[in-house]
Image: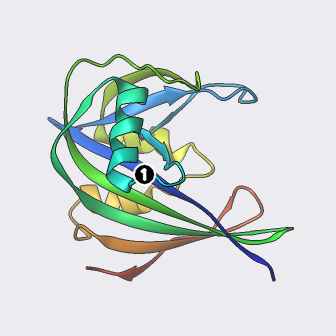
């Protein structure tokens, strides 16, 4: 089976007073907007933290404060008709500052808000491509920072349960 490394993804996990920072986004072909953690694809040659800072600024208008820590990592393995695709999604626990003012050059982000953690998990669970379990475990203190998971998908959006492979 052919193999392709697909991309590095960074996500911002910012908490404040029992709330998580989420962005409302809508792609060109999405019938309705959806909610997600701020973040996105790291550009070729871009360092992870530089990509994290750029995505945070573009999607929320906020700036990073201090040094983020890795909350958890998800290795995404997706079987497609073309073979196996692998992505690495690094979720960083971040302190942020500033006024929310999204400036997304791609035009996908409609808004950014602080959302109650329970409501945030409910909104994220509606995404067919995002598995909330690693985030839920991290928020509840069930997994130490740096825990690595594997999520396996078949096709575009058929989700398999994540497996925890390592606690760092």
Please, what secondary structure does the residue beneath circle 1 have?
Answer: strand
Residue 119 in view here: no
Q: Is residue 38 left or right of residue 140?
A: right
Q: Up-down: is 86 above or below 158?
A: below
Q: What x and y, as percent, mark residue 22?
A: 39, 33
Q: Up-down: is 66 above or below 82?
A: above
Quadrant of residue 165 within the rendered picture: bottom left
Q: Which of the pair 13/87 is nearer the observer?
A: 87
Q: What x and y, as percent, mark residue 87?
A: 57, 64
Q: Where does the N terminus fall, quadrant-wise?
A: bottom right
Q: Up-down: is 70 above or below 53?
A: below
Quadrant of residue 136 within the rendered picture: bottom left
The residue under the point 25% across, 51% down is 93
Residue 86 in view here: yes
Q: Up-down: is 24 above or below 71?
A: above
Say how the picture is coloured.
Answer: rainbow
Q: Which of the pair 148/5 is nearer the observer?
A: 5
Residue tagged by mark 1? 10
Q: Which of the pair 42/153 is nearer the observer?
A: 42
Q: What x and y, as percent, mark residue 129?
A: 61, 52
The residue under the point 35% across, 35% down is 56
The residue under the point 44% across, 51% down is 46
Say few, some or many: other residues with alpha carbon within 10 Å of mark 1 (under 14 / 14 to 19 / 20 or more): many
Most extreme residue toward the front, as rendered?
45
């Amino acid at each position: 089976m052919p193999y392709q490394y697909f991309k590095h993804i960074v996500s911002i996990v910012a908490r404040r007073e029992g709330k998580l920072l989420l962005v409302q986004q809508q792609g060109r072909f999405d019938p309705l907007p959806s909610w997600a953690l701020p973040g996105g694809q790291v550009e070729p040659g871009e360092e992870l933290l530089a990509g994290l800072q750029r995505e945070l600024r573009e999607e929320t208008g906020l700036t990073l404060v201090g040094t983020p820590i890795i909350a958890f990592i998800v290795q995404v393995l997706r079987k497609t008709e073309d073979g196996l695709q692998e992505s690495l999604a690094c979720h960083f626990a971040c302190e942020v500052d500033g006024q929310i003012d999204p400036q997304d050059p791609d035009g996908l982000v409609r808004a950014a808000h602080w959302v109650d953690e329970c409501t945030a998990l409910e909104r994220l669970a509606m995404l067919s491509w995002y598995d909330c379990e690693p985030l839920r475990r991290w928020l509840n203190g069930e997994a130490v920072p740096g825990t690595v998971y594997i999520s396996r998908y078949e096709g575009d959006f058929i989700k398999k349960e994540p497996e925890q492979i390592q606690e760092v």
